Image (cartoon, grey):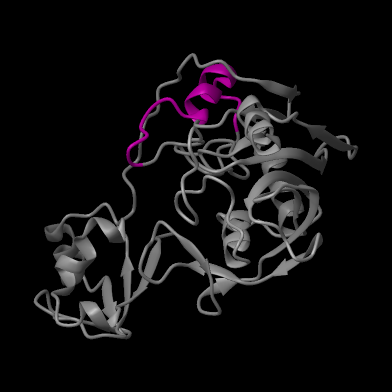
Amino acid sequence: MPEHVTFTVPEEFAGERLDKWLAAPERDLQMTRSAVQLRMEQQAVLVNGTPVPKNYRQRGGDVIEITLPEPEPLTLEPENIPLDIVYEDADLLVVNKPKGMVVHPAPGHATGTLVHALLYHCGDQLSGINGVIRPGIVHRIDRNTSGLLMVAKTDAAHHSLSAQIQAHSFTREYQAVAVGRFREPSGTIDAPIGRHPVDRKKMCVTQKNSKRAVTHYETILAYQKATHLRLRLETGRTHQIRVHLAYLGHPVLGDDIYGKPYPGLEGQCLHAAKIGFVHPTTGQYLEFESPLPDYFRRVLRQLRT
């Protein structure tokens, strides 16, 4: 299915040509100005629901919807990258992903991803539901989030595991260090998440074009200026924990998108510590845990001292 991206034009950009504004790097569409103009000619760019000419100058509050071109098919080469495999059978495998590894190819990350490593390890024994770019990938974690990720080898396993995620019966527990001390030591964040209206790299809490998002949290240990948390996802929206904690005013430590960088730490201090699901073939409930990695424990030591 083609991807549709929606923006709302801020007042400060009123009067600017739409093609130039959409092609700007801040929109992160990975499109040149001429490519945007072509989409406008094809009536794939709508302003308040109506096609506009290439020379259209936008107004503050305009709602822009652009239908992105279908990605060209890719052929990915397997790469011999070591994997920390926690569990594997004929249907699936559970991988402990290191911080810094991208899950699947994306602009700027054409090689060295988890998918490249899986192709080498599994060969053609990966679910094809998500196509060439994301074979076997049932769910994702961010590049700078470490921890457990489940991969489907067969389409039947993929369907079963995806259904469990949709039914919220899939266990996903994280640990994080958040900035500041919480007024309540535990609680539930129930706030809808959607694409940021201007910065496409970001998500935000919004009532517009959003989906319900629920995160449960509890304090493991409160430090002077930060809090070590355990979090359980009830839903699984993009950047959910990072967006929800930032929404509370306690962004994940080191989150350079929703918070601020932290010295000596690349990206957020967030770890997918536990995963649990019903095996698609045996019907047995399986649960796996990943110990806190070195970078996370180093941050905790710094907070203690």
User: Looking at the picture, does residue 4 appear above or below residue 293?
Assistant: below
Q: 38 or 168, which is in the foreground? A: 168
Residue nearer the viewer, 64 or 264 = 264
**Which quadrant of the structure image shows residue 105?**
top left
Quarter occupied by the N terminus: bottom left
- Left or right of 94 on screen, residue 128: left
Residue found farthest to the left: 55
- Write the residue at 45% across / 20% down: 78
On screen, residue 294 versus residue 108, left or right, reads: right
Q: In which quarter of the image is the C terminus?
A: top right
Q: Inspect the magenta stretch and tell me whether residue 115 lies in it.
A: yes
Q: Answer above or below: position of 287 versus 164.
A: above
Q: Compared to 265, does 5 lie above or below? A: below
Q: Which of the two residues, 199 or 38, is positioned nearer the viewer here?
A: 199
Q: What stretch is highlighted in magenta?
A: 107-126
Q: Could you say where residue 209 lies in the image, as x and y percent from the top left?
A: 51, 75
- Horizontal and vertical percent position of residue 73: 35, 40
- Residue 217 position in % (x across, y down): 77, 57
Q: In this view, which residue lies farthest toward the right?
A: 284
Which residue shows up at 76% across the image and 46% down it? 173
| For residue 246, above or below residue 127 | below
Residue at x 18%, y 73% (from the top left corner): 18
The location of residue 161, given as percent across then percent down, is 73, 45
Residue 302 drawn in magenta: no
User: Which of the pair 30/264 is nearer the observer?
Assistant: 264
